[in-house]
Image (cartoon, grey):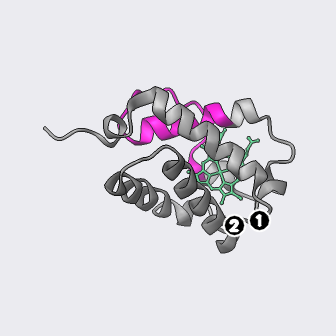
Amino acid sequence: MSKSLYERLGGSEAITNISSDLVDIHMANPRIAARYADSDPVKVKHQVATFFIAGTGGPNDYDGQEMRAAHTGMNIDNDEFVAVLDDALQALEMHNVGQREKEEVLYVLYSMKSDIVYV
Ligand code: HEM
């Protein structure tokens, strides 16, 4: 059987490190940093990592909200959504993730757009 995306990304430790860098990149990205001004970085990193791990085929320890509920009322626009995808690609490249895995992650993230933008 072929390996899950979770395994190909390097498992929980690797995905946790990618997620930590991703949240740091968001918080330093002038296009979206203000959205996280009141956020606790430790908590957001934990939520993003467990969501990412569960979503790629690893253990499901995510206890946060579904994507639509988590982003409802924020009035997130298309440019902000693209900024998050740009940051995700940057974090994946920092960790030397393979081309195919980058494409798979980006596609999964993109597919969540209708639950995040203007909900
Ligand atoms: C596919 C894209 C995205 C994914 C997978 C994603 C994922 C998540 C996750 C897992 C949480 C935690 C929810 C919880 O704790 O219940 C969250 C919260 C949040 N997201 Fe997103 N998100 C995405 C796009 C965006 C965009 C475009 C913005 C706006 C720039 C955004 C802003 C936020 C904010 C402000 C929070 C709350 C953070 C906090 O709890 O302090 N997200 N997101």
Residue linked to disc 2 = 80
The CB of the residue at mark 1 lies under 8 Å from ligand 1:
yes
Q: CA distance from mark 1 to mark 2?
A: 7 Å
Position of residue 80 measured from the top left corner of the image (x, y, whole percent): 69, 66
Q: Is residue 113 above or below residue 105?
A: below
Q: Is residue 25 above or below residue 12?
A: below
- Regarding residue 47, the answer to whether it shows in the image is yes
- Regarding residue 48, the answer to whether it shows in the image is no
Asked if the residue under mark 2 is in contact with the one under mark 1, i.e. CB atoms within 8 Å, the reply is: yes
Q: What residue type is disc 2 on?
A: Glu
Query: Left or right of 54: which side holds 90?
Result: right
Q: Nearer the viewer, mark 1 or mark 2?
A: 1
The CB of the residue at mark 2 lies under 8 Å from ligand 1:
yes
Position of residue 90 measured from the top left corner of the image (x, y, whole percent): 57, 55
Magenta stretch, residue numbers:
45-67
Considering the numbered disc 1 on the image, is that residue within a helix, a strand or a loop? loop
Position of residue 112 measured from the top left corner of the image (x, y, whole percent): 50, 59
Q: Nearer the viewer, residue 98 or 66?
A: 98
Give the class, few, some or many, for how many residues have Cα within 10 Å of label 2's Cα (few <14, many ≥20).
Answer: some
Which of the image's four quarters has the C terminus? Answer: bottom right
Q: Please check the rendered image and state whether residue 12 is part of the magenta-colored stretch, yes or no.
A: no
Which of the image's four quarters has the N terminus? Answer: top left
Give the class, few, some or many, for how many residues have Cα within 10 Å of label 1's Cα (few <14, many ≥20).
Answer: some
Residue linked to disc 1 = 31
Residue 60, picture quadrant:
top left
Q: Please check the rendered image and state whether residue 63 is part of the magenta-colored stretch, yes or no.
A: yes
What residue sits 33% from the left and 43% below the top? 5
Query: Left or right of 23: which side holds 109?
Result: left
Position of residue 8 measured from the top left corner of the image (x, y, whole percent): 32, 39
